[in-house]
Image (cartoon, rainbow, N blue to C red):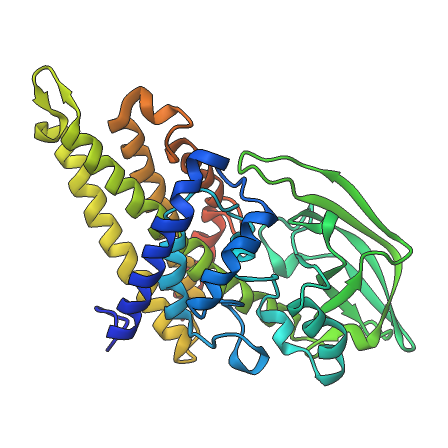
Amino acid sequence: MPGLFDLPLELKDLRTVVRQFVARELIPLEQVVGPQQITPDHVRLLRGPIEAMGLWQLDLSEEFGGPGLDLLARCVVYEEIGRTSVLPMRGLACLFGPRVGPILEQCNEEQRGRFLYPAIRGELKICFAQTEPEAGSDPAAVRTRAVRRGDTYVLNGSKRFITDAWQSDYAQVLCQLDDGRGTDTMGMLMVDLASPGVAHGRREPTMMGDAPSEVTFQDVAVPVTNLLGEAGKGFALSQRWLSEGRIKRQGALCLGIAQRSLDLMLDYARGRTTFGRPLADRQAIQFMIADSALELDAARLMVHSAAARFDRGEDVRNASYMVKMSSVETACRIVDRALQVHGGVGLTHELPLEYWYRQTRSMRITEGSHEVLRWVLGRNLVRT
């Protein structure tokens, strides 16, 4: 089946086009602007080539003006984009237009006019708020609570490590919904971050180079009409978003990082001579290269398989856990080996390796720590 062991011809062509774009437009910027320092001006200049490739609003369906690519196709794009360090890891999608996210596609007709279409046009910035100080990596343990009072939910709670909260207009807030009779369900509310009772806490700079922030809600009035999907479906919405992201943002993106790191390792080993012989002749170096190629090929097959299953409508939660752990940990090891082969040069800002070393290490914690994912995966398999 295409996508499991070999890409269909149209996706190979897409890969070639995006790879050429990355080599021509993005990698040369690495020595000019440095890691994740691409500016809005750069993005505006790149919009023409992005639209020419048919990739503007990459993640949107055709119904809302996007290319309507399935997840496997988008994984092909994300892998190629992952080869460059100029884009912020958290804001990678900025290259393809204003960030919208799949949850907003669940808007009803009335909500589309207030949220979805303005977000597509870039008039609204929207963040995703799930993580809490106590719940950590367990989305089912969120304590932020919204109690219904007539046509309004009264929201109380706090969120932490929320990417772009400080510059967003709305937050998609995963919370417990109380219908006023003591019955709780999980819901996803669109919360106006300019509402009375919303407070932005300190930003927390991280080794990834971003600075997520805290957001607290104290008796914040949220119209019932701001509920996305149905009451009780908030957890499913967040999990679908996370599953897709783990396959695409962590899985495929890390393939690109790992592949470029392997390419750099090979080029340097062939050209660097030590003690009268090329590094590439050393068995220790050859083993690093062989292990990297082996692990990368296996991780790529896992990403493609999970994406193809997602596109067929299968439940891929377990597969998404495996993809994230496999791809991120593979990229960690390959970046580490590439850095070791380069020696002192690998530690400098001249190459993207030190930047990717920090990014891939961070990914083992963000959007589900690997210890938690292993536990959840094992628990799910035991219960099956």
Which percent across, then down, holds residue 84?
Answer: 40, 45
> Relative to residue 281, is residue 147 depicted above or below?
below
Position of 248 with respect to 213 (left or right) is: left
**In front: 227, or 258?**
258
Q: In the rendered image of this protein, does residue 225 appear above or below residue 172?
A: below
Left/right of residue 115 with respect to residue 120 in the rendered view: right
Q: Report the front residue among 14 and 206.
A: 14
Residue at x 61% of width, y 76% of height: 105
Q: In which quarter of the image is the N terminus?
A: bottom left
Left or right, residue 202 beside residue 307: right
| Residue 34 appears in the rendering | no
Task: Name the residue located 36 percent from the left edge and 67 percent from the top edge.
Answer: 306
Q: Residue at x 54, y 68 (%)?
A: 57
Picture coordinates of residue 351, whole percent (x, y): 37, 32
| Quarter of the image where the C terminus is located | bottom left
Residue 63 in the image: state x and y as whole percent: 56, 83
Q: What residue occupies the far top of the structure in this picture?
A: 275
Residue found at x 19% / y 49%: 294
Between 375 and 87, the one nearer to me in the picture:
87
Q: Position of residue 72 (x, y in %)?
A: 37, 69
211 vs 220, left or right, is: left
Q: Residue 71 is drawn in which quadrant?
A: bottom left
